Image (cartoon, rainbow, N blue to C red):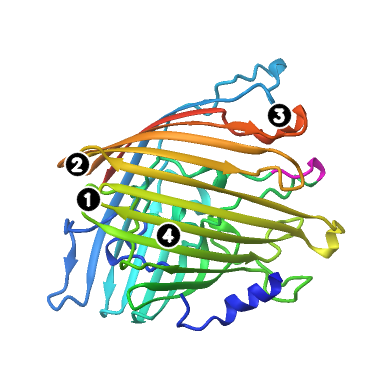
Amino acid sequence: MKKILLLALLVLPVAALAQQEEEETENGVVSVAGKEGFTIRSKGGDFVFKPYLLVQGAANFNYYDDEGLDKAYNQDNVANSGFSIPYAILGFTGKAFDKVSYNLSINAAASGANLLQQAWFDVKFKDQLAVRVGKFKTPFSHAYLTTLGSTLFPQLPTSLTAPVIMPYSLNAVTPNIATGFDLGVEVHGLIAKKFGYEVGLFNGTGSGTNAATKTFSDDWHIPSLLYAGRFTYMPKGVMPSTQGDPNRLNEDKMLFGLSLSENVESESESTNDFRAGLEWAWLKGRWYFAAEAYYMNVNFTKRQKISEDYNYWGGYAQAGYFVTDRVQLAARYDFLDRNGTGKDGMLNMPAVGVNWFIPGCNLKLQGMYQYIGRTGHKTQLDRDNDDLGQPMHTAKIMLQYTF
């Protein structure tokens, strides 16, 4: 069945359905809607060059329960707390020849290959057909594809970012459901301003390497890459890539999406990881709503001689409301079957937050609190193991500046 889905991704016609990001937010970091700033433009408008900046500073508090802590080594319940800089991005974006758009951004808060956050160019032949090449966001998850500086909460849903749990003998393979940034090539387009598609091939190694390190699949005898596609329907026109913007309090946009991907021999042990996702988002006046559900199957290659498949699923629902023109309240319910469908038990992760868009200076102040609860586990040991490495209580205050 997965091979059929994979082949479908490879041969989908251009007239298929995914989200086509608006021109104003295609850098994926900050919205430049109505912000000329230091934009350099040729007299005929064929060449455009615009620098942009995003800096985030955060105060963090994380409290972990006693499971997994060794008091003999003076391990504390409070860890990974204090001040941080999640992102310090400097980039530039623009257009050339009226058909090529480009984007490059450096994240000075990262290290190694992650310093290069994005580097891509996009050739648009027409609205229905464009090709993007380089390092950019893979086509999966509304939460991740939202412009970084326009998210409802200062951190992504834990159900997307937490590594899954397998039997201890197999814990060298611990993927998470999100696929994030990667190197590759993507065909995408927008049809009738309502239907979109993104179909691409990526390394499948994530943003942690900028090198070509892949080989051929031992089992399937195809390149061991990430094969991914995302298809969306936007009945009211193109959905902005924001989860709340004080300059968009009169919008009425909606999005329905489907994502499918197969990461062939994605882990070092190795496994083939299949992912599927459903999403919905609605921007209506002062309201923002979104809900997603996703599924991942981890299947070991034949040489590993492990016959079992491991299946995981999760999702979230969130909402935001502008109580004033500059203050937005936020709520999210996040859940994850982190230990797999073969064991009972789920993680429940409610969160609340507030955002203040400080007028006249492009500053955004965000605050949130999240609690991780556990329910339905068969034994106390299963319950204790399910949230290992994840804080029970999380509080964050983040100040963001964009230009």
Sequence-wise first label, 3 or 4:
4
Sequence-wise first label, 3 or 2:
2
Instruction: Where is residue 401? Give x, y as percent.
Output: 27, 42
* Mark 4: few/some/many CA within 10 Å (<14, 14-19, 20+): many
Instruction: Where is residue 21? Give x, y as percent.
Output: 35, 65
Kind of residue indicated by mark 1:
Leu
Mark drawn on residue 384: 3
Q: Which residues are magenta?
A: 165-169
Q: Residue at x 34, y 49 (%)?
A: 288
Quarter of the view holding residue 28: bottom left
Kind of residue indicated by mark 4:
Gln
Mark drawn on residue 325: 2
Sequence-wise first label, 4 or 1:
4
SS under mark 1: loop
Magenta stretch holds residue 112: no
Looking at the picture, tell me which residue is in the foreground, 116 or 260.
260
Quarter of the view holding residue 67: top right
Mark drawn on residue 379: none
Whether residue 115 is visible: no
